[in-house]
Image (spheres, rainbow, N blue to C red):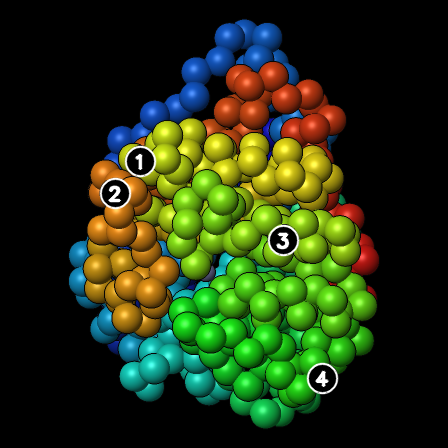
Amino acid sequence: MSLSKNYNGYKSFQYLEKDIDYKHFELEDELNRVPSTKVQLDEDQEQLVRKILADHILISVHEHVGTFPKDIMQTPEYVKHGRMATAYEGLAHSHWDCVFDNLMDGICQIHSKGGWKWSEVIHDLGMRLCDIAHQDFIIHCKTGADIHQAHNEGKVAWVAVMEGAMMIENELDRIDLLYGFGLRSLGITYSESNALGSGLKEERDGGLTAFGKRAVERMNKVGLLIDCSHTGDQTALDTIKHSRKPIILSHIGAKALWNTNRLAPDDVLKACADKGGVIGVEAAPHTTLTPTHRRHSLDSVMEHFEYIKDLVGIDHVTLGPDTLYGDHVGLHKAYTAALSLKASKSHGKPGMEYEPVEYVDGLENPTEGSYNILRWLVKHNYSEEEIAKVMGQNTLRLLNEVWV
Ligand SMILES: [Zn+2]
């Protein structure tokens, strides 16, 4: 990032009148919701952190940078009003030059019970873009040049992403429309299957469908980055094979370390990297656990990072922490079904007991993640060049190949 951010205090929807134009919810503190442990460094290491921030671009390939209600149980009502605030203040205090924002995704139930409807996701995207159009700290990112501009000007490049393609139904042209509206990455499926392929919660994975193949071809032609983080393993392998362009697994971990279907087996991770793709390591509560770290922490997340780095090489790994501004564990409780958590969690399986946490210390939100992942890499003697690759360059290379 540039060493200081160019933020003037803008808050979402301040161009409207609270409780006249829209229902106001008391929102979460974006900076200090819970205590956070910062990775401690010596003076030489602090100097390297400052040099990296000044000279290199830092990208998170998976977050939700919306701000949630202080009372997380108000979220379903907040969602129904279709007006998710963006965490400008939180991002202004982060190190990220660029964040991939996955919008409301599995909780986008503005008027439907199941979510993912075309009208709902377009509402969500349009509302966020309207807010973004009223300020100049976040840049709606559509090209690699936008990321460099954000770094140079102390701003944040915001990439609009949707985690699953349910909303395109059987209409290929909706891929073009989403790109036209400024979307730059799309998941093949969320955890539930759709017309393109099988989601991770299915017992049988039928792979990429005939329609899914055409959708992949269209995404390649249009320049939309493909994500297989929530697909079944066969659907991921088929997508990687069929795609002319490399893909991303934006928020995932190694199934070899923790055997849940939310994480990927070695053959999927390798296939993604062999094709030139990039793998972002996940940090949402209770996902990237390991047998040696049964309490979710920065160390368990980074154990997945190191496993994947050793498996596929440092040129193909990055971070996609998948954090947000609000009570993430509380959100999981409020939306267990919509987020397919039962189908993807390990609790209670023999040998996979873990210690539940209220939040992941030091990785609670995108701001903390940006500090502590960088600091962890410095503390563990990664070189400046390696850190630059992992925290931004690998993704920039991928985007240069895919986005047109
Ligand atoms: Zn996800």
Residue depth check, mark 3 versus mark 1: number of the one nearer the observer: 3
Task: Residue under label 4, please give it.
Answer: 214
Using the numbered discs, state the Cα–Cα distance from disc 3 to disc 2 in whole angstroms: 26 Å
Could you tell which of marks 3 and 2 lies nearer the N-terminus? 3
Using the numbered discs, state the Cα–Cα distance from disc 2 to disc 1 in whole angstroms: 7 Å
The numbered mark at residue 267 is 3
**Residue drawn at (56%, 25%) of the image:** 377
- Tell me the SS state at disc 1: loop
Using the numbered discs, state the Cα–Cα distance from disc 3 to disc 1 in whole angstroms: 25 Å
How far from the left and from the top, in percent, is residue 397? 78, 48
**Residue drawn at (46%, 67%) of the image:** 200
> Which quadrant, please, contains the N terminus?
top right
Could you tell which of marks 2 and 4 lies nearer the N-terminus? 4
- Tell me the SS state at disc 2: loop
Instruction: Work out which residue is located at the far front of the displayed protein and give it.
Output: 350
| Amino acid type, mark 2 | Glu
Residue depth check, mark 4 versus mark 1: number of the one nearer the observer: 1
Could you tell which of marks 2 and 1 lies nearer the N-terminus? 1
Task: Residue under label 1, please give it.
Answer: 294
How far from the left and from the top, in percent, is residue 302? 49, 33
| Number of other residues with Cα within 10 Å of mark 3, as a class: few under 14, some 14 to 19, many 20 or more | few
**Residue drawn at (51%, 25%) of the image:** 376
Quadrant of residue 402 in the image? Answer: bottom right
Residue depth check, mark 3 versus mark 4: number of the one nearer the observer: 3
Task: Residue under label 2, please give it.
Answer: 353
Using the numbered discs, state the Cα–Cα distance from disc 2 to disc 4 in whole angstroms: 41 Å
Using the numbered discs, state the Cα–Cα distance from disc 3 to disc 4 in whole angstroms: 24 Å
How far from the left and from the top, in percent, is residue 30? 35, 45
Q: Is mark 1 within 8 Å of ligand 1?
A: no
- Tell me the SS state at disc 3: helix
